[in-house]
Image (spheres, rainbow, N blue to C red):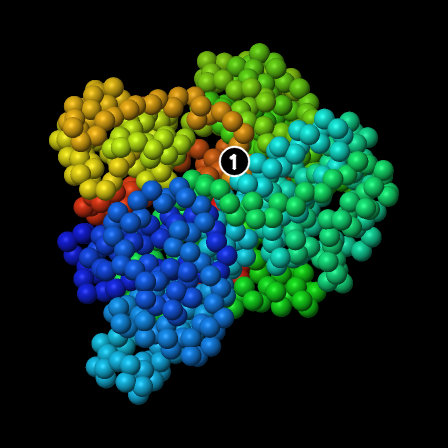
Amino acid sequence: MAKPESKKIFFENLSGAGKAIAVLTSGGDAQGMNAAVRAVVRMGLYVGAKVYFIHEGYQGMVDGGENIEEASWESVSSMLQVGGTVIGSARCKEFRSHEGRLKAALNLVQQGITNLCVIGGDGSLTGANLFREEWSGLLAELVEQGSIEADAVSKYSALHIVGMVGSIDNDFCGTDMTIGTDSALHRIIEVVDAIMTTAQSHQRTFVLEVMGRHCGYLALVSALACGADWVLIPEMPPEDGWEDKMCQKLSANRAGMKRLNILIVAEGAIDRSNRPITTDYIKDLVVKCLGFDTRVTILGHVQRGGTPSAFDRILASRMGVEAVLALLETTANTPACVVSLCGNQSVRLPLMECVQMTQEVQRAMDGKRFEEAVKLRGRSFENNLKTYKLLAHRKPESELPTSNFNVAVLNVGAPAAGMNAAVRSAVRVGISEGHKMFAVSDGFEGFYKGQIREIKWADVGGWTGQGGSLLGTKRTLPAKHVDKIAEQMREHNINALLIVGGFETCDRIKQSASGTKRRVFIIETMGGYCGYLASVGGLAAGADAAYIFEEPFDIKDLQANVEHLTEKMKTSIQRGLVLRNENCNENYTTDFIYQLYSEEGRGVFDSRKNVLGHMQQGGAPSPFDRNFGTKISAKAMQWVTKKLVETFRHGRVFANTEDSCCLLGMRRRALVFQPVVQLKGETDFVHRIPKEQWWLKLRPLMKILAKYKTSYDVSDSGQLEHVVRNRPKESDASVAM
């Protein structure tokens, strides 16, 4: 599909005047729904539309009255970090009937509402589409009953629907990630990490049941993120005789000095005959066959609870803004659409195409066509499953290919959460490919000093959830020690290098401010000259401003921000959050900005400052970092294998082409291997950042949601795409896990 012409929407010429938009949440709640509601309300008001809450989902639409309430800017303050849905959600049998939808239509027309933003699962969205299709007939019926005037039929002739998928199961086809999934993974991994400590202490086996009656995404990704010994999901039941294989693996792991076993089961797990596999069955099996002390933990609704993760807040905010844009651009002939995530981009897809493919998955499972079910889930799901199998199940030595290649893996630059997951993945995939794997300690410094050792499959067990860098990493650059590094490579006959590294908490603070009267926090984030953390952290935390190096600012900008915040504080807004990237400006320091806000806000608000520092690098990696590190490293190692085979001639590896040294990273919707030499023209080496940053397009969202007048580039929006069963091969590793 050709890229649409670049265009920008400005506050002055993007008008929702005369339009009324209603937002509702339906079905099961999911963390991040409130962020989506907030974004819809504020973007709608920003463009001049009236925006309404519909409380209690479709039930509130049917009942009408106080359930349909006009929203204000302040009515969505302080809800970004709140879990669940503050406007309520209820399953409504009455809306499934014609009479119920007739009542709902009357209630909407009475408020002049013809634009609906529905946040829910496939059932909720299917109901919305049926409502849209019946709309004109419902209005005609209301005229016959005398409930509305005849001219209302032409005035409110079309009902426009845009959906956002709120579901912790990630069970909706057409999007890489649904709102709430990442937060649910956080809850699961928090529990698994806690259980692993007690399991190791007592040499226990734990069987954990996670949500997913019809979709095994949570089970699969949490198993990948914690290195579980076994996982059972409905899309891919185990082969007959799996009980013996599972017990053999658990026994082998214990024999290999592993003190615990973790088994993760989706609540909808089945065998090849579509019979349920329960946690109690697995527990009894392990006790009977192995005699292991085995416990069962059912996580239940704890997976729906808690505050939404940064990922879900950002995803929901982006989707909410995109949903309003879609409603503004829709026509009477535009089909109902759903706003989805593909790679790092938001896209619009026909709602019913997505629903129909989602239903096809269940039909495939019911028909025992399990391979088809996995493929219908999408390449991200399929890739997760392949990666888990590759890393969790070691082939016997006799079945491993013999490559005679030696591959070394090392970490460079500052430590980052997820590095250990990447190293584990690289080592195990490399061994599966038949390579001899070497670990280099302390980056390039350890490399030239000869701190190199062979690393085995079992050596990286349990690394996935560890923070920092277990190999050690330093910022030493290789240029001064190239000869010594080359000597070490010759000595150990290393044919390839896999390097994991870089260019070599705001929420809790805002919650603290919530307990006070009119307080502004000035927060300094890390990132060198890259403003990603400040910008995306600001979007996730609902910041009022974020100062970064990529967007120069002066004293007039600072003054304008203070004045803007002062005006907001004079209303019901009681708190403010300002982020500053550590190197955004050498003169306008964190202290300077703090003093400026303190002085200019005197009498209206007081200020506090906080420098987050190295706490941003610490702690256990998130589910996203574990999964992404694991998958991207596996992909990199498979690429290394391919290149080694291609360049091996006459007993030697000839690495003399541009593509023999590549950087693997996400570009738009795909993971791309780009030759390092090509990056020279795209990189600002002085400040160690790319010359073009994709995330800069997200900054206007933060400003819009903070009530600033700004422009918003929608060059990537506006076209309705179509669901495809298989994406191009290079995009099979989604950034969204």
* Rendered location of residue 109, percent (x, y): 28, 73
Residue at the location (65% across, 37% down)? Answer: 227
Q: Is residue 26 above or below residue 502?
A: below
Q: Residue 442: in sight, yes or no?
A: yes
Q: Is residue 372 left or right of residue 323?
A: right
Compared with 611, 670 (above or below) is below
Total marks shown come to 1
Local SS, label 1: loop
Q: Nearer the viewer, residue 556 or 98?
A: 98
- Could you tell me which residue is drawn at 62 percent across and 57 percent down? 213
User: In the image, 344: left or right of 600?
Assistant: right
User: Which one is in front, 572 or 600?
Assistant: 572
Q: Please rate how many residues cluster around mark 1, counting C-alpha atoms within 10 Å: few if below 14, some from 14 to 19, many from 20.
A: many
Q: Is residue 336 visible?
A: no
Q: Which residue is mark 1?
A: 622
242 or 155, which is in the foreground?
A: 155
Q: Looking at this rendering, what residue extends furthest in the front direction?
A: 66
Q: Is residue 70 toward the left or the right of residue 599 in the image?
A: right
Left or right: 721 as drawn, with respect to 4: right
- The x, y position of residue 347, in whole percent, is 39, 56
Is 607 or 464 nearer to us in this picture?
Answer: 607
* Residue at 56% over, 19% down: 472
